[in-house]
Image (cartoon, rainbow, N blue to C red):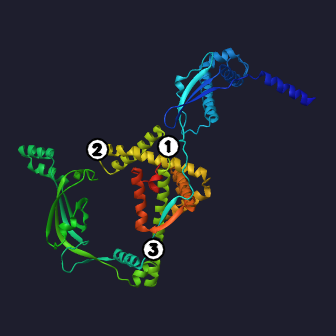
Amino acid sequence: MEEETKDQATAADAEQEPKTSKNTVTVEEAGPCKKKLVIEIPEESIKAAIDEQYTELGREAVVPGFRKGRAPRRLLEKRFGKETNEQIKLKLLAEASEAAIKDNELDILGDPDIDFEKVELPAAGPMKFDFEAEVRPEFELPKLEGIAVNRAKLEVTDEQITREIEQLCRWAGVWTPREDGQVEQDDQVVADVLLRPELTEEEKATLAEEADKGEEEETNSTVIEAEAKLDNTEIYVRPHGSVGTVPIEKLDELLIGAKAGDKKTTTVEVPKTHFREEYRGRKIEIEINIKDIKYLKPSELNEAFLQRYQVETEEELRDLVRDNLQNQNESRIRNEMSEQIYQYLLDNTEFDLPLDIVARQAGTILQRQYINLLQRGLSRQQIEEQMEQLRAGSEDAAKEQLKTFFIMDKVADKLEIEVTEEEINGHIAQLAIQRGQRPEKMKEQMERDGSLAQFRMDIRQNKCINKLLESADITETEAAEATKKPKKAKKKTKKAKKTTKKKAQEKDQ
């Protein structure tokens, strides 16, 4: 009897529930990777939503003169109508747009672009609205098994080991006065240096004006502000060297053969991008007064040197160097093979990209470059001159980064590759050890600055590449031959693609 009463009550409630009709949804193409959805919510659904909202409001609203839950709807509509209608409208729009996206199986990027202000809740009749949404590009992946990959044959030779040990000895060497006293290639010259920037036309005019006023002493102090006298400056004799902070091409040609006590002068034009504002774009006369000349005397391969590398004999050192060089070779081979996988996927996958996302990505790239130029000390005008050139390439860079992201994301889905929390923590721990930080602190920092999501994505991409390499058709080739292959592929496709694993991972996040 009790069950029968419940069934009757349920049936009665069902009869009282307002009947609603389904929304009418039309999906239209609105451009590359963009859909326009036109949605019409029927009057019955709107009325049901209004009744539900006021029923809930009636139970909670406190109106003077009425007990809680006893205020008539007419009074509620008068008192709370505007605010309630807005809530109803937003709820209907959110539910209708979410249902339309789900029912039409649209994989949208970001949130729907709905102009809520332009949509009004009608007093009668249906409510119609539309919005555009960027959707994930649809494309077919190329064959993922048996990708042709060249594996460079790199072997560590005895000559390489010897050269590496010689380099270690040079790094541990001591700068020693040169006996014959003449500068040679790669020497170190100790000198007193005077930098005299050329006056601009404006400064020359100021100089002349102050001279006319008889303010010569003040003028001299003003003019030499940009001059710099550098005592006991160490100068390294190289083709692309610098004196102080001023870069000098063919510096070795200027100094080779000179002796202590000689004076060498030259004039250079400093780039407009130089970090010292007082030198940018100026011609600078450089006077070098040589005081001492030294050469780098390599360390002897003695017991003290071997102890630096925690070995006892030269043979042990050679074994250590061999292992290090082999690890470097393996890393280089792995990077080159990964690059070939990326290039294969890019060359054999075609699809349009969401234009708005490309624009935003290009903007992000430019913003990073702009900040970098600011940090280098350039003025706004100088930055703008460089930004014109950077803008020309930012869209291509954005397209390549986005294309790589979508391809690798689909590859990961197809191969069912995921990243576990344990894997993330393990990679963070390794990185923290390298940087001398605590893993938990590094993870907290990555969560705060938003880089943890990118880190997870990078790990997932690496797992994809490893999986693809497992089934790749790998041909072992000589190192020189292996490096030529990618160039031929780029020429054939006529695309100036320079994708690298690192570049592919610089997405905006």
Q: Is residue 263 left or right of residue 8?
A: left
Q: Is residue 467 visible?
A: yes
- The vertical placement of 369 against 299, above or below, is above
Upstream in the sequence, badge 3 or badge 2?
3
Residue that badge 3 annotates: 155
CA gap between label 3 and label 1 equals 41 Å
Residue that badge 1 annotates: 351
Q: Nearer the viewer, mark 3 or mark 1?
A: 1
Q: Is residue 128 left or right of residue 353?
A: right
Q: Nearer the viewer, mark 3 or mark 2?
A: 3
Name which quarter of the figure residue 17 lies in: top right
Q: Which one is nearer the viewer's eye here, 71 or 352?
A: 352
Dot 3, how many residues are within 10 Å of its Cα: few (below 14), some (14-19), or many (20+)? few
Upstream in the sequence, badge 3 or badge 1?
3
Dot 2, how many residues are within 10 Å of its Cα: few (below 14), some (14-19), or many (20+)? few
Q: Position of residue 454 (x, y in %)?
A: 52, 51
Three-letter code, disc 1: Phe
Residue that badge 2 annotates: 385
